[in-house]
Protein backbone atom coordinates (compact mmCIF):
# COMPACT_ATOMS: atom_id res chain seq x y z
CA UNK A 1 0.00 0.00 0.00
CA UNK A 2 1.51 3.35 -0.96
CA UNK A 3 0.99 6.54 1.00
CA UNK A 4 -1.66 7.89 -1.35
CA UNK A 5 -3.69 4.76 -0.96
CA UNK A 6 -3.39 4.84 2.82
CA UNK A 7 -4.68 8.43 2.76
CA UNK A 8 -7.60 7.33 0.59
CA UNK A 9 -8.37 4.50 3.02
CA UNK A 10 -8.47 6.96 5.92
CA UNK A 11 -10.67 9.35 3.96
CA UNK A 12 -12.97 6.54 2.84
CA UNK A 13 -13.47 5.36 6.42
CA UNK A 14 -14.10 8.88 7.71
CA UNK A 15 -17.76 8.60 6.67
CA UNK A 16 -20.12 6.79 9.09
CA UNK A 17 -22.25 5.26 6.29
CA UNK A 18 -19.16 3.83 4.60
CA UNK A 19 -17.89 2.45 7.92
CA UNK A 20 -21.26 0.72 8.33
CA UNK A 21 -20.97 -0.70 4.84
CA UNK A 22 -17.46 -2.00 5.53
CA UNK A 23 -18.71 -3.64 8.74
CA UNK A 24 -21.54 -5.24 6.73
CA UNK A 25 -19.11 -6.49 4.06
CA UNK A 26 -16.85 -7.96 6.73
CA UNK A 27 -19.66 -10.47 7.33
CA UNK A 28 -19.89 -11.40 3.65
CA UNK A 29 -20.23 -10.10 0.08
CA UNK A 30 -23.32 -8.04 -0.73
CA UNK A 31 -24.83 -6.30 -3.73
CA UNK A 32 -25.30 -2.54 -3.85
CA UNK A 33 -29.04 -3.13 -3.42
CA UNK A 34 -28.46 -5.23 -0.31
CA UNK A 35 -26.11 -2.58 1.07
CA UNK A 36 -28.74 0.12 0.45
CA UNK A 37 -31.51 -1.76 2.29
CA UNK A 38 -30.83 -0.59 5.87
CA UNK A 39 -30.46 3.06 4.85
CA UNK A 40 -32.92 5.71 3.88
CA UNK A 41 -30.87 6.54 0.80
CA UNK A 42 -31.01 5.74 -2.89
CA UNK A 43 -29.13 2.93 -4.56
CA UNK A 44 -27.33 5.67 -6.51
CA UNK A 45 -26.05 7.21 -3.27
CA UNK A 46 -24.84 3.83 -2.07
CA UNK A 47 -23.14 3.30 -5.43
CA UNK A 48 -21.18 6.50 -4.86
CA UNK A 49 -20.06 5.25 -1.44
CA UNK A 50 -19.02 1.93 -2.99
CA UNK A 51 -16.98 3.83 -5.58
CA UNK A 52 -15.09 5.71 -2.85
CA UNK A 53 -14.39 2.43 -1.04
CA UNK A 54 -13.31 0.83 -4.33
CA UNK A 55 -10.98 3.75 -5.19
CA UNK A 56 -9.33 3.24 -1.80
CA UNK A 57 -8.84 -0.43 -2.64
CA UNK A 58 -11.03 -1.49 0.27
CA UNK A 59 -13.79 -2.98 -1.86
CA UNK A 60 -13.88 -4.76 -5.21
CA UNK A 61 -16.80 -5.65 -7.47
CA UNK A 62 -16.77 -8.68 -9.71
CA UNK A 63 -17.24 -7.44 -13.25
CA UNK A 64 -18.41 -10.72 -14.75
CA UNK A 65 -21.25 -11.61 -12.41
CA UNK A 66 -24.75 -10.31 -13.05
CA UNK A 67 -25.26 -9.28 -9.43
CA UNK A 68 -21.83 -7.62 -9.16
CA UNK A 69 -21.50 -8.30 -5.43
CA UNK A 70 -19.17 -6.04 -3.43
CA UNK A 71 -16.29 -7.77 -1.73
CA UNK A 72 -14.19 -6.43 1.15
CA UNK A 73 -10.47 -6.59 0.37
CA UNK A 74 -9.37 -8.05 3.69
CA UNK A 75 -5.67 -7.67 2.93
CA UNK A 76 -5.89 -3.90 2.57
CA UNK A 77 -7.94 -3.59 5.70
CA UNK A 78 -5.69 -5.89 7.75
CA UNK A 79 -2.58 -3.99 6.70
CA UNK A 80 -4.02 -0.69 7.84
CA UNK A 81 -5.25 -2.26 11.06
CA UNK A 82 -1.75 -3.58 11.73
CA UNK A 83 -0.17 -0.18 11.14
CA UNK A 84 -2.50 1.51 13.55
CA UNK A 85 -2.24 -1.32 16.08
CA UNK A 86 1.53 -1.11 16.00
CA UNK A 87 1.46 2.63 16.52
CA UNK A 88 -1.00 2.23 19.38
CA UNK A 89 1.09 -0.57 20.91
CA UNK A 90 4.22 1.63 20.91
CA UNK A 91 2.31 4.44 22.59
CA UNK A 92 0.87 1.98 25.12
CA UNK A 93 4.34 0.67 26.00
CA UNK A 94 5.65 4.21 26.36
CA UNK A 95 2.86 5.18 28.73
CA UNK A 96 3.20 2.02 30.80
CA UNK A 97 6.79 3.13 31.43
CA UNK A 98 5.39 6.54 32.38
CA UNK A 99 2.96 4.80 34.77
CA UNK A 100 5.94 3.34 36.61
CA UNK A 101 7.65 6.75 36.88
CA UNK A 102 4.44 8.36 38.13
CA UNK A 103 3.98 5.59 40.74
CA UNK A 104 7.35 6.62 42.18
CA UNK A 105 6.33 10.28 42.28
CA UNK A 106 3.20 9.28 44.25
CA UNK A 107 5.32 7.27 46.70
CA UNK A 108 7.70 10.22 47.12
CA UNK A 109 4.84 12.50 48.03
CA UNK A 110 3.37 9.87 50.39
CA UNK A 111 6.72 9.47 52.13
CA UNK A 112 7.16 13.24 52.45
CA UNK A 113 3.71 13.62 53.99
CA UNK A 114 4.21 10.91 56.61
CA UNK B 1 8.52 -4.50 31.33
CA UNK B 2 5.50 -5.50 33.34
CA UNK B 3 2.53 -3.26 33.23
CA UNK B 4 1.59 -1.30 36.30
CA UNK B 5 -1.79 -0.28 34.99
CA UNK B 6 -3.44 -2.15 32.19
CA UNK B 7 -6.82 -0.61 32.79
CA UNK B 8 -5.86 2.53 30.87
CA UNK B 9 -5.56 2.07 27.13
CA UNK B 10 -4.28 4.45 24.47
CA UNK B 11 -6.98 5.77 22.16
CA UNK B 12 -5.79 6.96 18.75
CA UNK B 13 -7.61 8.93 16.10
CA UNK B 14 -6.30 9.87 12.66
CA UNK B 15 -8.21 12.89 11.43
CA UNK B 16 -9.42 12.49 7.82
CA UNK B 17 -9.55 16.24 7.09
CA UNK B 18 -6.26 17.54 8.56
CA UNK B 19 -2.93 15.68 8.90
CA UNK B 20 -3.29 15.16 12.63
CA UNK B 21 -2.96 12.20 14.96
CA UNK B 22 -4.78 12.56 18.27
CA UNK B 23 -4.13 10.36 21.25
CA UNK B 24 -5.58 10.14 24.76
CA UNK B 25 -4.51 8.08 27.76
CA UNK B 26 -5.57 8.22 31.42
CA UNK B 27 -3.12 8.07 34.32
CA UNK B 28 -3.27 7.59 38.09
CA UNK B 29 -1.54 10.90 38.68
CA UNK B 30 -2.22 14.60 39.07
CA UNK B 31 -1.71 17.03 36.18
CA UNK B 32 1.30 18.43 38.09
CA UNK B 33 2.90 14.98 38.30
CA UNK B 34 2.35 14.39 34.58
CA UNK B 35 3.82 17.81 33.84
CA UNK B 36 6.87 16.95 35.94
CA UNK B 37 7.33 13.61 34.15
CA UNK B 38 7.27 15.48 30.82
CA UNK B 39 9.59 18.35 31.79
CA UNK B 40 12.14 16.83 34.21
CA UNK B 41 14.84 15.43 31.86
CA UNK B 42 15.84 12.56 34.15
CA UNK B 43 12.25 11.38 34.52
CA UNK B 44 11.48 11.95 30.83
CA UNK B 45 14.48 9.89 29.70
CA UNK B 46 13.22 6.95 31.72
CA UNK B 47 9.92 6.54 29.90
CA UNK B 48 10.06 8.13 26.46
CA UNK B 49 11.44 4.89 25.02
CA UNK B 50 11.07 2.97 22.78
CA UNK B 51 11.39 -0.33 24.65
CA UNK B 52 14.93 -1.66 24.68
CA UNK B 53 16.50 1.71 23.85
CA UNK B 54 18.41 4.05 26.14
CA UNK B 55 17.55 7.71 25.94
CA UNK B 56 20.36 10.22 26.45
CA UNK B 57 19.36 13.85 26.87
CA UNK B 58 21.84 16.21 25.20
CA UNK B 59 20.04 19.52 25.61
CA UNK B 60 17.01 20.33 27.71
CA UNK B 61 15.35 23.62 28.61
CA UNK B 62 11.68 22.86 29.25
CA UNK B 63 10.53 26.47 29.45
CA UNK B 64 8.60 28.64 27.00
CA UNK B 65 11.08 29.42 24.19
CA UNK B 66 13.45 26.65 25.28
CA UNK B 67 14.76 23.71 23.29
CA UNK B 68 15.47 20.02 23.59
CA UNK B 69 17.61 17.33 21.96
CA UNK B 70 18.09 13.69 22.77
CA UNK B 71 19.33 10.46 21.23
CA UNK B 72 17.84 7.00 21.57
CA UNK B 73 20.49 4.26 21.36
CA UNK B 74 20.42 0.50 20.94
CA UNK B 75 23.29 -1.82 19.98
CA UNK B 76 25.52 1.08 18.96
CA UNK B 77 22.90 2.61 16.68
CA UNK B 78 21.73 6.09 17.58
CA UNK B 79 18.63 7.99 16.54
CA UNK B 80 18.55 11.70 17.29
CA UNK B 81 15.54 13.95 17.84
CA UNK B 82 15.28 17.66 18.52
CA UNK B 83 12.84 20.53 18.76
CA UNK B 84 11.76 23.66 20.60
CA UNK B 85 9.43 24.23 23.51
CA UNK B 86 7.02 26.80 22.16
CA UNK B 87 5.00 26.98 25.35
CA UNK B 88 5.31 25.26 28.72
CA UNK B 89 2.30 26.17 30.84
CA UNK B 90 0.75 24.75 34.00
CA UNK B 91 -1.09 21.95 32.28
CA UNK B 92 -0.11 22.34 28.63
CA UNK B 93 3.02 21.84 26.52
CA UNK B 94 3.39 22.96 22.90
CA UNK B 95 6.59 21.88 21.18
CA UNK B 96 8.09 20.98 17.83
CA UNK B 97 9.50 17.56 17.01
CA UNK B 98 12.04 16.64 14.32
CA UNK B 99 13.77 13.31 13.66
CA UNK B 100 17.40 14.06 12.75
CA UNK B 101 17.18 11.47 9.94
CA UNK B 102 14.51 13.62 8.26
CA UNK B 103 15.70 17.14 9.09
CA UNK B 104 13.17 18.85 6.81
CA UNK B 105 10.24 17.23 8.60
CA UNK B 106 8.72 18.84 11.65
CA UNK B 107 5.58 18.15 13.61
CA UNK B 108 3.81 20.41 16.08
CA UNK B 109 3.03 18.56 19.30
CA UNK B 110 0.39 19.85 21.70
CA UNK B 111 -0.16 18.05 24.99
CA UNK B 112 -2.55 18.98 27.72
CA UNK B 113 -3.43 17.33 31.00
CA UNK B 114 -7.09 17.20 31.94
CA UNK B 115 -7.77 16.77 35.67
CA UNK B 116 -10.38 14.01 36.08
CA UNK B 117 -10.41 14.30 39.90
CA UNK B 118 -9.62 11.53 42.41
CA UNK B 119 -5.95 11.65 41.42
CA UNK B 120 -6.59 10.80 37.79
CA UNK B 121 -5.58 12.80 34.74
CA UNK B 122 -6.29 12.41 31.05
CA UNK B 123 -3.38 13.14 28.71
CA UNK B 124 -4.41 14.60 25.36
CA UNK B 125 -1.67 14.64 22.74
CA UNK B 126 -2.05 16.02 19.24
CA UNK B 127 0.56 15.80 16.49
CA UNK B 128 0.17 18.03 13.45
CA UNK B 129 2.47 17.10 10.56
CA UNK B 130 2.94 18.97 7.29
CA UNK B 131 1.17 16.53 4.96
CA UNK B 132 -1.11 13.53 4.90
CA UNK B 133 1.76 11.56 3.37
CA UNK B 134 3.91 12.51 6.34
CA UNK B 135 1.18 11.55 8.79
CA UNK B 136 0.49 8.22 7.15
CA UNK B 137 4.19 7.40 6.82
CA UNK B 138 4.50 8.12 10.48
CA UNK B 139 1.63 5.81 11.31
CA UNK B 140 3.17 3.20 9.06
CA UNK B 141 6.73 3.69 10.36
CA UNK B 142 6.25 1.20 13.15
CA UNK B 143 4.89 -1.43 10.82
CA UNK B 144 5.69 -4.92 11.89
CA UNK B 145 3.95 -8.17 11.27
CA UNK B 146 1.69 -8.51 14.23
CA UNK B 147 -0.63 -11.19 15.40
CA UNK B 148 -3.29 -12.04 12.87
CA UNK B 149 -6.39 -10.19 13.92
CA UNK B 150 -9.86 -10.96 12.74
CA UNK B 151 -12.67 -8.60 12.05
CA UNK B 152 -13.59 -8.41 15.72
CA UNK B 153 -11.56 -5.21 15.93
CA UNK B 154 -13.37 -3.66 13.03
CA UNK B 155 -15.98 -1.79 15.02
CA UNK B 156 -13.46 -0.41 17.49
CA UNK B 157 -11.09 0.71 14.78
CA UNK B 158 -13.60 2.40 12.57
CA UNK B 159 -15.20 4.09 15.57
CA UNK B 160 -11.84 5.66 16.37
CA UNK B 161 -11.45 6.93 12.83
CA UNK B 162 -14.71 8.84 13.18
Image (tube, rainbow, N blue to C red):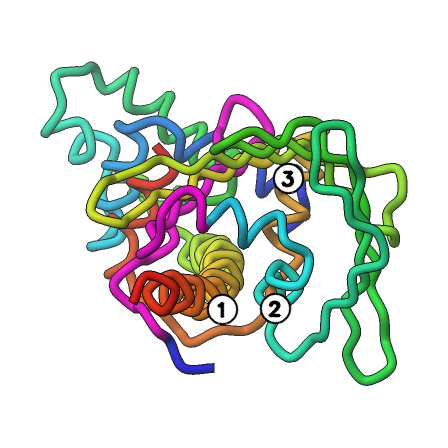
Q: Position of residue B139 (x, y in %)?
A: 59, 50
Q: Which mark is residue B135?
A: 3
Residue B119, compared with residue B146, is above or below; it is above
Of B107 and B131, nearer the camera is B107
Residue B29, compared with residue B93, is above or below; it is below
The answer, for residue A9, to whether it is visible in the render is no
At 35% from the left and 73% from the top, the residue drawn is B4
Q: Position of residue B150 (x, y in %)?
A: 30, 66
- Residue B24: within the magenta? yes
- Please state the chain letter of the residue tagged with numbered disc 2 in the rendered image: B
Tell me whether circle 2 and circle 1 mark residues in contact (CB < 8 Å): yes
Span colored in magenta: B4-33
Label 1 crowding class (10 Å Cα cut-off): few <14, some 14-19, many 20+?
Answer: many
Same chain for mark 3 and mark 1? The answer is no
At 43% from the left and 69% from the top, the residue drawn is A104
Q: Disc 1 designates what residue?
A: A97
Label 2 crowding class (10 Å Cα cut-off): few <14, some 14-19, many 20+?
Answer: some
The answer, for residue A44, to whether it is visible in the render is yes
Q: Secondary structure at mark 3?
A: helix
Mark 3 or 2: in front is 2
First along the sequence among labels 3 and 2: 2
Residue B144, compared with residue A75, is above or below; it is below
- Residue B162: within the magenta? no
- Which quadrant would residue B31 be assigned to in this image? top left
Q: Which mark is residue B46?
A: 2
- Please state the chain letter of the residue tagged with numbered disc 1 in the rendered image: A
Real-space CA distance between mark 3 and mark 2, rounded to the nearest whole angstrom: 26 Å
Q: Position of residue A25 (x, y in %)?
A: 26, 47
Amino acid sequence: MDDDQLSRVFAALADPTRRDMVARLAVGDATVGELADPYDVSVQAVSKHVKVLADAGLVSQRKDAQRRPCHLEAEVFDLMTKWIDRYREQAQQRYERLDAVLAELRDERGAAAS
Amino acid sequence: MTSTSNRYQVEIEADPTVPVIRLTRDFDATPAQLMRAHTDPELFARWVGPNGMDTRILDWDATTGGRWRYVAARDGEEYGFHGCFHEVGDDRIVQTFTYDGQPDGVSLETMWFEDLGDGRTRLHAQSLVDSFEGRDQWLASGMEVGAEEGYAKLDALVAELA
